[in-house]
Image (cartoon, helix red, strand yellow):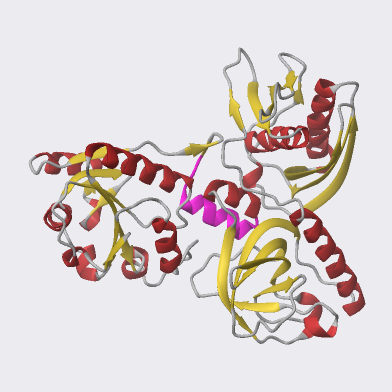
Amino acid sequence: MQLYESLTSASLTGPTFLTIGNFDGLHRGHRALIAAMCAAARTEGATCGLVTFYPHPRTVLRPDQPVSCLSSLDERLALFAETGLDFVVVHPFTQATAQTEAEDFLHLLHAHLGLRRLWVGPDFALGRGRKGTTAFLAAQGAGMGIQVEVVPEFAWEGQVIRSSRIRRLVEMGHVEWAATWLGRFYGLTGLVVRGSRRGHSIGFPTANLAVAAGRVIPANGVYATWAWVEGRRYMAVTNVGLRPTVNGTHRTVEAHVMDFDGDLYGRSLRLEFVARLRDEMRFPGLDALRAQIARDRDRAAALLAREPVVPAEPRFEEVPHTADWAIRVRGKTQAELYANAAMAMAILQGAADVDGPTVTTFVEVEGIDRETLLVNWLNRLLWEAETQQLTPSSFWIESISDERLTALVTGRRGRSEMAHIKAVTFSGLEVTPPARDGDDWRAQVVFDT
């Protein structure tokens, strides 16, 4: 992938297919747009490229309003390199850039990049005062032989994916939801700096991560994380917050890296946030804190030992039904199928919008067969929501058979403003095991709303 430091440093003759934007986090929607553009470019013998801006335009236009991002410029460039793009232009965003008229910017793209087709989303706008809407650019571009391709908003499992919403999810501590929409675990990279060394004194040494200003940091709490050190991956349990038990005065990101033997100070460390374990809390003393950290470590190790992955394909789809909601769910195993059915129900009820205290509960359910077990499992989660005000969002199936299921369920206290499901019905219910090796487990579920 060729990198250009400005539009004027490039001299491509085209034909070029191009997209423009900040692409913070390079989420699934961004990747889908780039993949479609590159596929079309390959078919038509064109070059495919991307223009982004640095610094972020809002830091120039509204310097009094801090900007938090999901990814640094270096991280975005590394992600761009994975997509098949032929080139990327990082154009300096200055006051002069902000004052450039849309038609003048279009002429720059045509002159320096050989632009023939511009791929953008429906709300895209370019140039001074955002004058260059898709309709404006299409009209201006027609006389220059430039076509504007407007790509619909990208949805994943019925949810429209936007960087702004993913930033909000991370800030709320919903790292599982953020990973699903990003297409990978959310990560922070920084140097390990010296802290107070209190972790050493209680038997749990921690790496204190120096995070660059402007990065989105997950909500205060404790997380199961992967720690990457010089290309090697380790299990870790990470605390984000003020450390109230020891009267901390500033926010830190501290990771206890399991099974690591060595000095991390001054070294680069990357943390990938896999699951939220609990809220940050104050303990009566160091002994109570030490005991809780041991429990956090053991739980994080148990979760990470399962090698959790971000789904590569949607786990469910809504299907037409004469009344209420109906979904089809898939999973590689019976346990994954039942967890995915619960996740689908959580998504339909807006669980990602609930920002109350984190709650974890152990659930045991029985049924006379697979179908009854699935209905009883989902209805038990609805009961938890109705009676305990628990909106579940993470589901770890501990054991499962056709007649019995045990699971660890994590969620938030509170309810969303979306329509609530009243019950799971037996109407149209199906649970189908794989017909042959390599097939998925599948189910159809109808909800009474």
The percent coordinates of residue 115 (x first, y second) are 17, 49
Instruction: Provide residue 310's location: percent of width, then percent of height.
Output: 61, 47
Vertical placement of residue 26 versus 60, above or below: above
Q: Is residue 165 magenta?
A: yes
Q: Nearer the viewer, residue 300 or 65?
A: 300
Can you tell which quarter of the image residue 217 is in? bottom right
Residue 35 pos. (x, y %): 38, 43
Locate the N terminus and report the quarter of the image it occupies: bottom left
Specify the quadrant of the image occupied by residue 186.
bottom right
Residue 122 in view here: no
- Residue at (74, 43) in percent of width and height: 392
At horizontal 39% and vertical 58% (from top left) the residue drawn is 81
Quadrant of the image containing the C terminus: top right
- Among all residues in the image, which is located at the extreme left? 143
Q: Position of residue 34 (x, y in %)?
A: 36, 46
**Residue at 32% of width from left, 69% of height from top?**
60
Count of picture labels: 0
**17 vs 153, nearest the viewer:** 17
Q: Which residues are magenta?
A: 160-173
Does the magenta run of residues contain 295? no
Q: Is residue 25 left or right of residue 339?
A: left
Dominant secondary structure (helix, strand or loop) of the stretch shown in magenta: helix
Location of residue 128 by image quarter? bottom left
Residue at horizontal 31 percent and vertical 44 percent from the top: 120
Left or right for 305, reference 4: right
The answer to whether residue 372 is seen in the rendering is yes
Is 355 left or right of 390, judged from the image as shown?
left
